[in-house]
Structures are given as structure tokens and as C-alpha cells.
Image (cartoon, grey):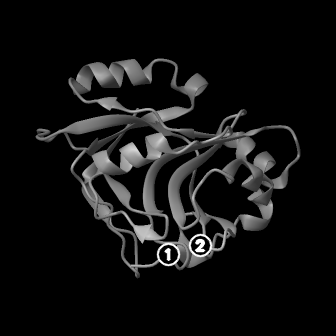
Amino acid sequence: MELKGPVFLMQPIPYFGEKIRGNWIIEPKIDGWRLQIIKYKNGKIEYWGRRLEKKPNWTKFLNYLNKFLKNIPNGTLLDAELYSTKGRRGIPSVIRRTGKAKPLIFVFDLIFYKGRFVGGKSLKERRKILEKLKLREPFTLLPSQKLKNLKQALKKYSLGPAKKGYEGIIIKELNSKYQISPEAPIASHYWKKIKF
């Protein structure tokens, strides 16, 4: 599979209290706008939202961020969340470049790397590749931690969510693959969201 353009990003499903088995991690759920960052084989960079049916091409609004992606290899597609120093309400300012808010981009997955589809690799393997990328601010790797106790994790992440920009947590199975479809986003039971 080749990197030809934006993809339908994989989606989490709600968590309904079922027993969790396997090897899972927790990530904070940032209250931002889902963003895919594409750096084509020729070095051209595009920024797209998740709802492809609406053609959310934000490239002309966010191309001022290209200078921070020079270290990212060509042929890479990153799954991320666009946020701002003023929270969710500051994202339009980031898009319009008013200067009222600065961008914060939290990268949490990798779909293509150096021109190859890496969704067939486990999340654990994809995270290892992400950790080796030299992301430059305002791009940062979204922190994660091993899931040990869901109740304790919820309590920890729910403290001061407005200040941190969290609206919940996402739990992900480390052996999971990244599934994409040409027609619509795939909702994976290997990604579960819990809102506060």
C-alpha cells in the first residue's frame, strides 16, 4: 500500500465497563481537532482533518508549521490532535494565525513511514518508531502509560482536565494494528474512549 493522500483515520469505540484483557496503554484524550499530517515522498506536506467526506484540507492554514517537520522522513503520515495554548477555543486562532493562541500538536500514531504502510505493525512497534522521530515543538508525542488499574487511571487523569486539555482517556491494546478503509473510518474495539 502506498501513501497517496489522506486516509480515513481509525476511531475508538466507547468503553461500556467490559473486562479488559491483554496488554493495554492509556493516553489522555485531548479535547482538540483530529489532524493527519502527511509528508509525501517528494517532501510536500499537507494537513487534513478526519472527516474526509467534508474535504477538510487545512494545508493553506497550517503550512507555517512545515519548518518544524524537516526532521520527519518523506513518505510519513502521522495521526495527531490539533490543540492550542488557549485550549479548544483557541484552535480557530491557530488556523487563522491571529496570534491569540499558539499551536500544540499531539502526535499519537503512525500510519505510513518512509513510504511504507506500517499499520500492519503492532501499536507497540509503531510507538517505538514514533519515539525515535525527532519531533520539534509545537509537535510532541502524546504521553502514554501502561494500564494497570482503570479506576486509578481515571481518577488521575480527571484531576484538572480543563487545565490540561483532557476530556477523558483512550485505552489501546498494544498488539493492535492500524486499520484503514477506502470508504469510511474503522471503529476499533482495540481503542476504547472514556469521557469524564
- Say left or right for 65 vs 28: right
The reply to whether discs 1 and 2 touch (Cβ–Cβ < 8 Å) is yes
Amino acid residing under circle 1: Leu
- Camera-nearest residue between 6 and 17: 6
> Front-most of 135 and 53?
135
SS for callout 1: loop
Left or right: where does residue 51 sit relative to residue 187?
Answer: right
Occupied quadrant, residue 148: top left
Disc number for residue 41:
2
Which residue is at the front of the view, 82 or 88? 82
Q: Position of residue 119 (x, y in %)?
A: 34, 63
The N terminus - image quarter: bottom left
Residue drawn 55% across and 41% down? 31
Q: Is residue 128 above or below residue 143?
A: below
Indicate whether 38 appears above or below 134: below
Question: Could you say which quadrant of the image residue 164 lies in?
Answer: top right
- Residue depicted at 54% across the width and 77% down the height: 53
Q: Residues within 10 Å of mark 1 (few under 14, many from 20)?
A: many
Residue 70 appears at what percent x and percent y? 69, 53
Cα gap from disc 1 to disc 2, whole angstroms: 8 Å
**Residue under numbered circle 1:** 3
Q: Is residue 132 shown above or below 160?
A: below
Instruction: Provide residue 2's location: percent of width, then percent of height.
Output: 45, 78
The amino acid marked with disc number 2 is Lys
Q: Indicate which disc, 1 or 2, sits on the residue closer to the N terminus.
A: 1
The residue located at (55%, 76%) in the rendering is 5
Few, some or many residues within 10 Å of mark 2 (<14, 14–19, 20+):
some
